[in-house]
Image (tube, rainbow, N blue to C red):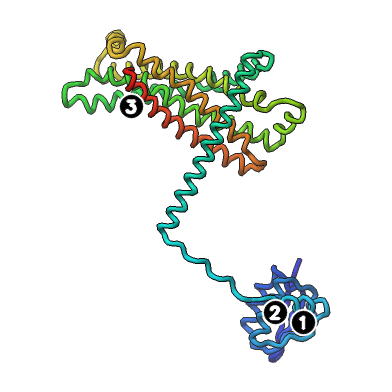
Amino acid sequence: MTALAVTCDGGRAALEGVLDIRTVSQARQALAKLDFGVIDLAKLEALDTTGALFLRDLRAKPTEITGVRADHQALLDFIGSLDAKPLPKPRAIPRWRELVIALGKGAEASWHEAHDVVSFLGWAATATLKALVRPRYLSLASISRQVAETGINALPIIGLLAVMISIVIAYQAVVQLRPYGGEEFTVNLVAVSVLREMGVLITAIMVAGRTGSAFTAELGVMKAREEVAALQVMGMDPMEMLVVPRLIGLVITLPLLTFFADVMGLVGGAAISRFLLDIWPAQYLERVHGAVDTHDLLVGLVKAPVFAVVIAIVGCMHGLRVTGSAESVGRETTRAVVKSIFLVIILDALFSIFFERIGW
């Protein structure tokens, strides 16, 4: 336990104990209350660079320093010989220039992120094609486990969300259309919205938050424990062992979850239509059949595999980026979820434009 004692007799102060980075603030506070012209260091046991800097500043006041030990004197002489000029103030940067620099850095970071995603997608596609062409490289047990975890276990939350979303859409449609006498078009609005957009979009966002984060966390912990490096040492390809089963499993499950969400969304629309519009289920089904066609169902199902690829690639890529600490796992998991949801929404907008162009 380091300790420092400061005493004063007349105009002579004495330091006893250890003067280092941990006690220099105590010495500064104690000496500030005293009136002295001489400091005695005869009983000073230890001195470090921070303490020597403090004594050099005192000597410049001026203050006489006596009783310095030989080893302490060498340190004081060395510190005294250093150039003590203050560092120059950094040049102020105009606000407009800071904005331009920030935009440039953001654009560069976005470019590198896009390059990394495309590169990782290429590696994963190569490994997946290799596994499909040569089934001995395909781990069916791992794929079935991913299907169970990403698909079957997600059915309750996906179903509940789809029902709630369809109820919200139907309720808001009734409120807006009733003043104009068009509340019967609520069924059309719910059916088209759920099948074309909301079913697949809500499912993809939920899967990105639930499954994409799990992919990143699992692979991140494996990377932190050097299990990925162990696979490479044993001659196994981490892409083939860890990424391909997750990618294939999610590509299988997300379209199925989307179809389940579509069904549950229509069920929710039927429930709210019964209570708000007094439309019985048989009438509801008849109106749904007249409002939508096969294209409306296919639009949502076609998007699902693309969203699955994006979510799996981003989740696995960020998991393999983990550097070894718990903080890194949390940071990469957050980035993976945010990036997955962002890309899903961007792709959904592009799909909407594309399907409108081809007349779907």
Mark sitting earlier along the chain (2/1): 1
Mark sitting earlier along the chain (3/1): 1
Residue type at tag 2: Leu
- For the image shown, how many numbered marks are present on the structure? 3
Relative placement, left or right, of 149 versus 254 is right
Residue type at tag 1: Leu
Residue type at tag 3: Val
- The residue carrying mark 2 is 55
Q: Quadrant of the N terminus?
A: bottom right
CA distance for labels 3 and 2: 73 Å
Q: Nearer the viewer, residue 102 or 254?
A: 102
Q: Are marks 3 and 2 in contact (CB under 8 Å)?
A: no
Name the residue: 51% across, 24% down: 308
Q: Are marks 2 and 1 in contact (CB under 8 Å)?
A: yes
Mark 2 burial class by Cα count in 10 Å: few <14, some 14-19, many 20+: many
Relative placement, left or right, of 185 versus 2 is left
CA distance for labels 3 and 1: 79 Å
Q: Quadrant of residue 274?
A: top left
